[in-house]
Image (spheres, grey):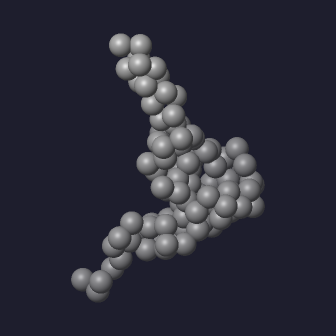
Amino acid sequence: MKTLFALAITAFVSLPAFADHNGPYQRYPYYSTSVNCSELKQAVAEAGGLIIYSSRSIYDAYVSSSYYCPTGEQAQAAYVPAADGNCLLKKCVYRDHGR
């Protein structure tokens, strides 16, 4: 029983090291209006993709390139509010196949 308990504790403590299921996206809120545009662009470039909140309940995923978009989507220019005005980033949208 002690061995089983020790194994369970070890697995539980190790879990955060294997819990990155979000791919390139970070796991904590990033509020666009609290930083300037250059900081947002740098953070997206370094992470590949970020979930960015523009308010407490409005958010979207922004990426550095189409490489970070799910299959069937591509990166497209999008504005997000920043501390120093609107900031041009990229977000994933469905590809238009001429329909």
Residue drawn at x 52%, y 53% as measured from the top left: 25
Q: Quadrant of residue 96?
A: bottom left
Q: Farthest residue to the top: give it.
A: 1
Q: Residue 76, percent across and down?
A: 49, 73
Q: In the rendering, at what x and y percent does residue 75 appear?
A: 48, 72
Q: Is residue 92 left or right of residue 55?
A: left
Looking at the image, which is closer to me, 29 or 82?
29
Q: Residue at x 49, y 72 (%)?
A: 67
Please, is residue 77 above or below residue 21 in the view?
below
Q: How many marks?
A: 0
Q: Quadrant of residue 95?
A: bottom left
- Residue 58 horizontal/vertical position (percent): 48, 45
- Give me the residue at 35% from left, 70% from top: 71
Q: Is residue 36 above or below residue 79?
A: above
For the view shown, which residue lies furthest in the left direction? 99
Quarter occupied by the C terminus:
bottom left
Question: Which residue sits furthest bottom?
Answer: 98
Q: Is residue 71 left or right of residue 48?
A: left
Q: Looking at the image, is 93 positioned above or below residue 26?
A: below
* Residue 98 visible here: yes
Considering depth in this image, is 11 or 52 the residue closer to the camera? Answer: 11
> Can residue 79 be spotted in the picture?
no
In which quarter of the view is residue 93 placed? bottom left
Q: Is residue 32 above or below residue 1?
A: below
> 23 and 95: which one is in front?
23
List x then y, in percent, for residue 43.
68, 57
In which quadrant will I find the N terminus? top left
Residue depicted at x 30% and y 83% = 97
